[in-house]
């Protein structure tokens, strides 16, 4: 465990202890605690380094997740989200739908419709290809005109402009 010296606190970017910091690690970023956990430090060691009570570290990790939880989330995010979506949708009953605000119904329908199309590999955003093609052609013509004014050839990728 690193020594508790002013230099060690500066190296780990931990502020000096304050009288109110004993139970609240408000000046200790979660990323630092997460990094300490990834390095294998125990909760008491982290609490000592951060100059807070051990319970404050436990509460912060409970609120934000421990290293294993975060790594599991990163690896299995799509599956976890899918399970949560299914859980949420299973609570939407005909009675709840009847009680919904009409605006919420329309918004919910639109979101579910977009997500269904995304899952099926269908378009979720319509783009006018003709507008893109026209814009591209216009930009190419403008580029060529500028290069000609500079007395450059459009077929050379680089030139000696000074």
Image (cartoon, helix red, strand yellow):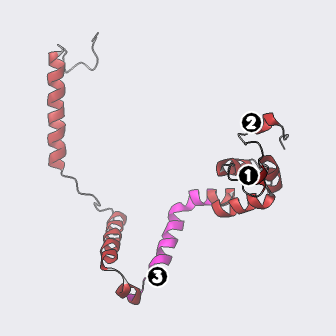
| Residue located at (14% from left, 47% from top) | 130
Classify mark 1: residues with Cα within 10 Å, few (<14), some (14-19) or many (20+).
Answer: some
Q: Is residue 41 visible?
A: no
Q: Position of residue 39 (x, y in %)?
A: 75, 47
| Residue located at (71% from left, 53% from top) | 25
Residue wearing tag 2? 10
Front one among 57 and 131? 57
Q: Is residue 147 left or right of residue 119?
A: left
First in sequence: mark 1 vs mark 3: 1
Q: Mark 3 or 2, which is nearer the eye? A: 2
Which label belongs to residue 90? 3
Q: Which residues are magenta?
A: 71-94
| Residue located at (68% from left, 58% from top) | 68
Residue wearing tag 1? 37
* Position of 43 relative to 103 (above/below): above
First in sequence: mark 1 vs mark 2: 2
Which label belongs to residue 94? none
Classify mark 3: residues with Cα within 10 Å, few (<14), some (14-19) or many (20+).
Answer: few
Q: Position of residue 102 (x, y in %)?
A: 30, 79
Q: Position of residue 153 (x, y in %)?
A: 18, 17
Q: Is residue 94 left or right of residue 129?
A: right
Classify mark 2: residues with Cα within 10 Å, few (<14), some (14-19) or many (20+).
Answer: few
- The CA distance from mark 1 to mark 3 is 36 Å
- The CA distance from mark 3 to mark 2 is 51 Å
């Amino acid at each position: 465990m690193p020594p508790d010296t002013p230099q060690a606190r500066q190296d780990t970017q931990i502020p000096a202890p304050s009288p109110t910091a004993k139970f609240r690690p408000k000046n200790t970023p979660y990323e630092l605690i997460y990094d300490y956990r990834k390095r294998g430090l125990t909760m008491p060691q982290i609490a000592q380094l951060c100059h807070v009570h051990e319970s404050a570290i436990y509460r912060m990790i409970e609120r934000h997740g421990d290293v294993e939880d975060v790594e599991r989330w990163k690896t299995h995010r799509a599956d976890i989200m899918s399970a949560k979506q299914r859980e949420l949708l299973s609570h939407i009953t005909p009675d709840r739908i009847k009680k919904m605000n009409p605006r919420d119904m329309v918004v919910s329908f639109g979101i579910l419709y977009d997500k269904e199309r995304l899952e099926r590999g269908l378009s979720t955003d319509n783009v006018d290809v003709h507008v893109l093609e026209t814009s591209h052609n216009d930009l190419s013509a403008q580029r060529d005109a500028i290069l000609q004014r500079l007395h450059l050839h459009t077929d050379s990728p680089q030139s000696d402009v000074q």
